[in-house]
Image (cartoon, rainbow, N blue to C red):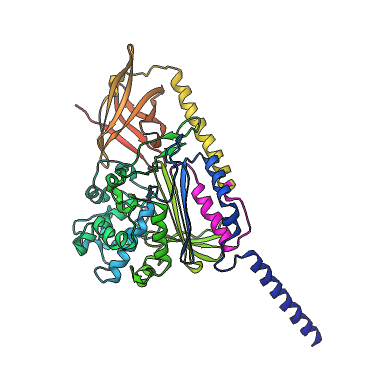
Amino acid sequence: MSHFKLTATFMKQIVWLTYFLYCLCQPAYGQTPQFVTDSLDIYIKRGMTDWQIPGMAVGIVENGKIILAKGYGVLEAGTQQFVNENTVFPIASNSKLFTGTGFALLDTQKKLSLDEKVIKYLPNFKLNDPIATQLVTIRDLLSHRLGFKNYQGDFLFWDSSLTRQDVVTRMQLHVPPYQFRQDFGYSNQGYVVASELIPKVTNQTWEQFIQNQLLNPLGMTRTFILYDDMRKQSNVALPYTTCCNAQGNLTRIPYDNLDNLGPATGMSSTVRDMTLWLKMQLDSGRVGNRQIIPWAALEKSREANTIASSSRMTLFPLGFQFYCLGVGLLDYAGVSVFAHAGACSGFRSSTTLVPSKKLGIVILTNQDHHSFQEALRFQLLDAYLGVPYTNRHQYYFNRAKAKDQKSQEEIKALASRVEKNAKPALPLSAYTGTYQNNLYGTLTITAEPVKQTKQRLTIRFQHHPNLTGQLDYMDGNQFRLTFSNPRFGIFPVTFVQDSAQVKSIELSASEFVDNDSYIFSKERL
């Protein structure tokens, strides 16, 4: 009996000691972690230097207050135009939560149901599988469970002249490699199709609905839905990349016009406006004493719909990952975290919500070839959730250096093959003409002089009027393709030929744009 009492007493001491140590590691509720107060600026500046990020802005919402809304670096590399809390950045796929929240609101208002079939509102809508066509719901579109691969078909629409209606009608041409409702496959196009339902139940366009229901009530006066509205503003960050060149140099690139994919990835905002968005999300849909969004709608937007990953990472306290409506749900250090990332040419961003801690984080950057926004997200989560310090920036940076070195070596190898000045078996005129892809449309290849005695092949794309491709012969049936927009990449392309006739060309863009390659068949005169 005495032994039992001694053991019980000892166990109580262990429990209390464990709790005491846990409390030492945890920031007191409502207290900003020391990492944020003492080390954040140094950490950010070091990360920006390592990753060659010209400018970024960071916002933190804590217990209903904006404790940080700050700019770092510059709008344009080499200038003294400094980023501040009102600098505009494209937020890319962080647009999805606006669309997802809008649909959760419409569901709560009984104007539609997330589980209604799409063909109820768009009777002519089709997927490649006729059974899936009959079954697909609004929730399916918004939860990335159509059976598509990640980013499948994005090359067609990314910064192209194809319209949202083209997105809708071309959905039937995509052949999903996975089963409907079984696997997670990230699809920008699903959000575009869903947005076409909004006028059916509100008599407003998607743009009008988001502006009237979300942006205006929140006072998000420097958040823009359309590309032209963003470009008219002052204090807008310029786009940069370090991708797709042999030296990893920082390069200015064109802005993307993503109006056709707007409901998925087309909005732009500032760190100040985004902290207002996060505050509302963390205050059960309220702004002060006003209920902007019913709590029931926010609950619907955060329901797990699709398993994105069931693997547990060893270097992060990260477990399950689900996709909800425009936001992911993560188990991080035993806490439910709602998070999303965004990327378009020249920009990367992230948003994070931890409702149980009343914590929100937004990170905006004007360089697209880095993972610092993810490193900083997890570093801040570690600080707020009491996870022992690990340098997340160094982890991501070391991995990226190895990958970038491999990519740069591949680009150098392509240049070496071009520099041998080999002659193709066929005259360049044999490669010229119009090529057809049933999903995309056409491209044309012409031979154009570059010197008095030399010609080069140039590709022009039917639906990408601002994009060209330069073809330089290497060897065999392969040319090096260099896109005029550096973010689309540099790749070997192969012509298929039959004796003296060219039959087709297979080309791809960078994984940043699309994971697939496309075969274009040459049209015969």
Q: Residue furthest right?
A: 2
The reply, left or right, for residue 523 in relation to residue 385 is left
Please name whichever residue, 228 or 517, is drawn nearer the observer in this view of the structure: 228
Name the image quarter holding the C terminus: top left
525 vs 296, nearest the viewer:
296
As rendered, which of 245 and 416 lies closer to the eye?
245
Q: Residue farthest to the bottom?
A: 1
Residue 273 visible, this orientation: yes
Q: Residue furthest top?
A: 453
**Is residue 487 shown above or below 175?**
above
Residue 152 among those drawn in magenta: no
Please report the residue visible at 63 percent of the width from the left and 58 percent of the height from the top: 388
Which quarter of the image is occupied by the N terminus?
bottom right
Task: Residue 490 in the image: state x and y as whole percent.
Answer: 41, 32
Residue 304 can be seen, yes or no: no
Residue at image location 28% in from the left, 53% down from the top: 192
Residue for point 63% across, 55% down: 389
Residue 20 coordinates in the image, percent (x, y)? 68, 71
Whether residue 382 is in magenta: the answer is yes
Most extreme residue toward the front, as rendered? 80
The stretch in magenta equals 366-393
Spot occupied by residue 453 in the image (x, y as percentages of width and height): 33, 11
Q: In this image, 243 relative to 152: left or right?
A: right
Q: Position of residue 90 (x, y in %)?
A: 37, 47
